[in-house]
Image (cartoon, helix red, strand yellow):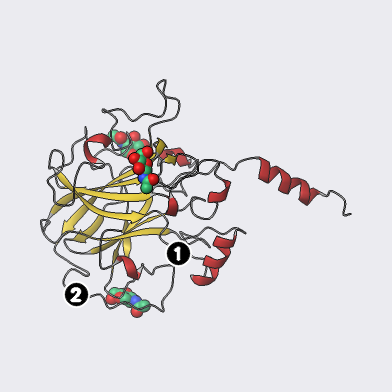
Amino acid sequence: MAPFGLCALLLALAISIRPILTHSWVEQLVRIAPNGTMIAPAGYIRGYVGRTEPGFNDAENTYLLPPNGRPDGKVVHSDDRICKATQQIGNYSEDYPMLHVARGDLVALRYQENGHVTLTKSNANVKPDKSGIVYVYGTANPLASDTLLGIHQVWTADGQGGDRRGRLLATRNFDDGQCYQINDTPISKSRQIQASKEAEDPQGADLWCQSDIRLPCDLPRAGTYTLYWVWDWPTLAPETNNQSAVVSPEIYTSCMDINLDDFSQSADQNVNFIHEQDANSRVIYEQLDNNFI
Ligand SMILES: *[C@@H]1O[C@H](CO)[C@@H](O)[C@H](O)[C@H]1NC(C)=O
Ligand SMILES: *[C@@H]1O[C@H](CO)[C@@H](O)[C@H](O)[C@H]1NC(C)=O
Ligand SMILES: *[C@@H]1O[C@H](CO)[C@@H](O)[C@H](O)[C@H]1NC(C)=O
C-alpha cells in the first residue's frame, strides 16, 4: 500500500473543508456587434472597485440579501435596498465609466462563476439547477430608495407590475452553459475544451459567464437608464430541485446606469453570428433572439 503522502493529506483536507466560494457581481457590460463579438469599450456597475486596485477585496462589489447575521435569520426585509450602499445612482469614476449604448442594442453583462458552476458539488446546500436565475430589470426613473421586494418578482415584462416605474427586461440561467474557471472538475475540463481560448486579460484563463440581452427599442435617444441585475440563488429543501421549495433566500445584486445615445451597434441589424471566433469576446448565440429563458 502506498504511504499516506502529503498529496493525499492535502486532498483529504480539501474534501473535508468546504471551500469558501466568493460571490459574483457584474464585472463589465459590453455592446455586442451583429456578428456576436463584444465591442470595447466596456462599461461598469455603479461604485465598481476593480480587481487590480490595491487592497482589493470581494466585499467591495458583493451585495448579499438577506445579509449574514440578521437576528431574525435569513429574511429579506421590506426596506432592504436593491442596491449596495456604495452603488448609489450615478456613482461612476473615470476609470470605470457607464456603458454608452443605444436603444435596441445587444448588451452582454459579464460576471465570474466563482465556483458556482464548476464547483457546485462542494456546496453542502441544495441549490437550483443551472446555479439559479439572473433577472435583469430596467427603469428610466430609479430611486435611491428602491427596494428588492418592491421590484424583484414584482416588476413585469409589460411594465404593469408593482409601481410601474420599470420592467423586467430579461431572465437568464446563471450558468450560461459555457463559462468556467480553471480547475480539475469534469465540468471545467470539458468546457475548457468546448470553449477553448488563449488566456487574455481581464479574464485570464477563465471564461466569464454572460447574460446577453437586447435593450428595449422604445428607450429615449439620450439620458441615462438603469439596470438592476438580480441573481436569485436560494437554498432549496433537500432532495428537491423545486424552485418554489425555498428554505432560505440568497440573492446578489449589481446596480448600473447606462448612457443612452444615438449610435447603435446592432439595433437595426439582423444577427449574423460568426460561430468560429475568439471565445474571449464571443457572446452566446442562443441568447440573442430572446431575452427570456
Ligand atoms: C465583428 O464585428 C465587429 C464590429 O464591426 C468587429 O470589430 C469584429 O472584428 C467582428 N468579429 C469577427 C470575428 O469578424
Ligand atoms: C462610490 O463608489 C466608491 C467605490 O465603491 C465608494 O468608495 C464610494 O463610497 C461610493 N460613493 C457613494 C456616495 O456611495
Ligand atoms: C414545489 O414546492 C411547492 C412549495 O413547497 C409546492 O407547492 C409544489 O407543489 C411543488 N411542486 C412540485 C412539482 O413538486
**Quadrant assignment for the C terminus:** bottom left
Which residue is under mark 1?
178
Measuring from the top left, give residue 170's x and y in whole percent.
26, 55
In this rendering, is residue 3 above or below 33? Answer: above
**Quadrant assignment for the N terminus:** bottom right
Instruction: Tell me the residue at 56%/50% (across/down).
Output: 121
Measuring from the top left, give residue 107's x and y in whole percent.
28, 61
> Which circle, 1 or 2, is nearer the viewer?
1
Measuring from the top left, give residue 263's x and y in whole percent.
17, 66
Q: Is residue 252 visible?
A: no
Q: Residues within 10 Å of mark 1 (few under 14, many from 20)?
A: some
Residue type highlighted by circle 2: Gln
Q: How many marks?
A: 2
| Residue 155 image-quadrant placement | top left
| Residue 92 image-quadrant placement | top left
Q: Is residue 119 left or right of residue 264?
A: right
